[in-house]
Amino acid sequence: MLLGGDNFVMKGGDMVSGRSGAMLSYVVNVSLRRLELVLGDITEQAVDVIVNAANRRLAGGGGVDGAIHRCGGAAIMKETREKYPDGCKTGSAVASNAGNLKAKYVFHAVGPNWYYEPDRFDLLGLAYGSCLKLAVNLGCRSVVFPSISTGSYGYPIAESSVVAIKTVGDFLKSVDGVNSSLEFVRFCLFSESDFAVYRESVDNYCKDN
Ligand code: AR6
């Protein structure tokens, strides 16, 4: 059984400085580690790793990519240009410094474009999974993801959240008993409706596992 005892903890009403005023968060235990949902702006997160929803050229762009480069500063792009001149394949991720953000690293993950990638389901899972492996290899304690591919890349959020939650949940189970530094994986959702969709996917995952 994946979940035991008092696993669902709804924390409502904590005040934060995010754009929505009151912060919503939802936390479940997956084996020894936590899977968390929060509502807010990912650039305000204080964690070891902030994941960026990047493009293959690592060229920056709009959405969460634009926000991360804007808030993180030029040091992030400087490093990605030097270290990854060929960019990053869809379904993969690479690490850079986090510039001015309250994190040790930014992981630039490239999710699939819903309209152009026939293997989008697998590629989305691989994008999340690449970040999780990288985080463990770099000895990180905490990772925060945006909802990869569900903005410009058009992946319907209900479908993508199932892939995201399953990939993270299964990964957390797979590192059970492994002496890894990882403590929690968080999704930072940008709207209340996105938060609600992810919450439903978490509940369904927990029921099925
Ligand atoms: N904090 C948290 N989530 C955010 C934020 C934020 N500050 N800003 C947007 N989101 P998108 P994609 C949510 O378009 O679909 C870029 O131009 C947003 O509401 O950022 O993977 C890249 O350069 C949505 O739910 O990423 C690529 O070319 C989610 O983040 C392309 O877009 C992802 O939306 C990648 O497209």
Image (cartoon, rainbow, N blue to C red):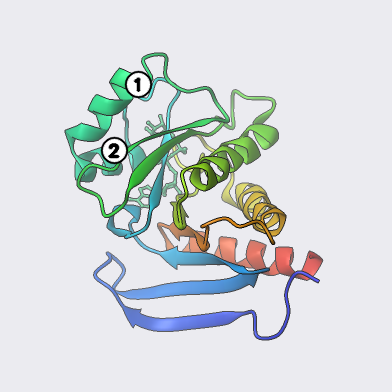
Nearest the eye: 140 or 102: 140
Label 1 Cα neighbours within 10 Å, binned few <14 / some 14-19 / many ≥20: few
* Residue at image point 59% right, 28% down: 115
Residue shown at 37% from the left, 58% from the top: 47
Q: Residue 39 at x, y = what percent?
A: 41, 65
Give the residue number, with chain letter if any, for mark 2: 66
Q: Position of residue 82 (x, y in %)?
A: 29, 19
Q: Which residue is mark 1?
A: 83
Q: Quadrant of the N terminus?
A: bottom right
State the CA–CA distance, disc 2 to disc 1: 20 Å
Quadrant location of residue 204?
A: bottom right
Ligand 1: which quarter? Answer: top left
Residue 7 percent coordinates (x, y): 64, 79
Q: Position of residue 59 (x, y in %)?
A: 33, 23
Does the Cβ of the disc 2 residue fall within 8 Å of ligand 1? Answer: yes
- Nearer the viewer's eye, disc 2 or disc 1? 1
Image disc number at residue 72 = none
In the image, residue 144 above or below residue 135: below
Q: Nearer the viewer, residue 201 or 165?
A: 165
At numbered mark 2, what does the secondary structure look like: helix, strand or loop? helix
Q: Residue at x 43, y 27 (%)?
A: 55
Three-letter residue code for mark 1: Lys
For the residue marked with disc 2, what is the amino acid?
A: Gly
